[in-house]
Amino acid sequence: MLCGSPDWPGFANAVVAQLEKAGALNFLEAEQLKGLGDSRRTLSIAIGVARERSIDINFDGILHPERPHQVGLDLYDLLASLRPVFVTTNYDKWLDEAGPREATAERPPGNEAQPAERPAPRAKYYLREHLTSDRLAERGAVIHLHGSYIDPKSMVVSLRDYIEHYADERVRTLLAEMFKNHTVLFIGYGLAELEVLEHIIRSNEKVAAPGVEPRHFIVYAHRSTERVQTEFTERYFRDQCGVQVIRYCIDNKGYSELLDVFKAWQPEFDVRDASTLDLQNRLDRCVADSTASRRESALRLVKRNPGLAAYVLNSLNDPAWFEDLFQEGFFEPKHNPTLKEVETAQGKAFQAEGWPALRYLERVTSQLSADQATKAIDILRAIDADPVRRSLNNWRTSWSMATIVSQLPTELLTSDDFDMMRGWLLGPFDSSMVGGELGKRLLPRLLQSDIPGDEEKALVLVDVLTTPRRTEGS
């Protein structure tokens, strides 16, 4: 509102006015719709009429005045310079466009033919499917909890929108993560949504204990004549919500006083990037409660921070992650670790690293569904067929594949798969670990199986295991 955007009644009335201008409502209907006395109810009905009549509401024109007030722009620029994570229920653009744009990877300077690219706009998320908790680790990002005017379909406006939105697992997980594991400063927000209050209160259950300080704060405007009322408000927020009130007096300048407040606070703010330990703790929470939303959040976080991939993969024991890892390409041959050449007292030697994604697959193969098991054997075939993998000769990868294939349903194994196993055993490095897995785990399963054809597969495996290895000079 400091920029000139409307309050809730003004927003609702402007939408109704556009319906009247478009001929969807007459004067009496528009007047009585505006007079309902509940902005959310007015908006719910107005948006419903707009959708029924296929009328496009100009939300941009309603939310953004042609000449925004400078005090509001200055405040947003100041907030943007701190680069926190912004979570807003507003639909407007003020946070998206405030302050300097986010820096991107360095690029070579441009020329007349190809000008240098400017810094990218600040990341903004407003679609419900993008409201995952990993966004809370992305400094400078703007999370539009109720959607954005950019895509009117994303806007949470009507009562039905609110109910559906806050029933979504992603939204609930995002709010739970934010209020349980972050410090939140509320600015220009009255904590009126019961759906948000629920998560604040649940996250602050321990705050009710004596001596425990609140972790969340609200900047609260007051007049000097409202001392008693302000004290009651502070008590409400502290006792009921676990939120500490930070007052500022608006006697002299009104709500624009908020800009001076933040100018005074700016040197004291210390907003930091999440540390590696913070990110690992976030991943631990996703592993401990591996809902679809948390899995999506964890893998998105890993994609932005590839160094965390091994950490999370080594923590997984739940087959629920298999499909997500498969879809995100974690089992693709390009991730197969290369051998490292090292010098030792005895001369040149090679070190082989394990492949965390395959180690995860080792742990869950026996729990996979039939369709997933088929995907697992296809993963092994793709890895083995990759010419790069053949040149790598990573015996740890072969060992993992032998462990996995030994647990798969035997009916999936073909003659070509046994030829694949033979190749694992005939590489240039010691393959006793591969042979041990196949001989101790797969062979007994084939011998004890009642499935037709498994007895013949056992004989083929014996032949594979007893294939003589070539030695130097032979």
Image (tube, grey):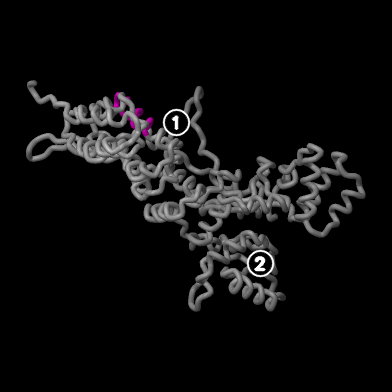
Q: Residue at x 56, y 50 (%)?
A: 170
Count of numbered circles on the image: 2
Question: Element type at marker 2?
Answer: strand
Distance between the alpha carbons at the discs numbered 2 and 1: 47 Å
Q: Residue at x 30, y 24 (%)?
A: 415
Q: Is residue 126 above or below residue 466?
A: below
Q: Nearer the viewer, residue 215 or 5?
A: 215
N-terminal of the two: label 2 or label 1? Answer: 1
Q: Is residue 111 above or below residue 443?
A: above
Q: Nearer the viewer, residue 392 or 442?
A: 442
Q: Is residue 362 left or right of residue 251?
A: left
Q: Which residues are magenta?
A: 377-388
Task: Report the magenta stretch's main SS.
Answer: helix
Q: Quadrant of the C terminus?
A: top left
Q: Nearer the viewer, residue 188 or 334?
A: 334
Residue annotated with mark 2? 221
Q: Is residue 431 left or right of residue 289?
A: left
Residue 406 position, x and y percent, is 29, 37
Residue annotated with mark 1? 109
Q: Quadrant of the N terminus?
A: bottom right
Query: Closer to the observer: label 2 or label 1?
Result: 2
Residue flagged by tag 1: what amino acid is it? Pro
Residue 289 position, x and y percent, is 46, 54
Residue 315 position, x and y percent, is 36, 50
Q: Residue at x 26, y 29 (%)?
A: 421
Residue flagged by tag 2: what amino acid is it? Ala
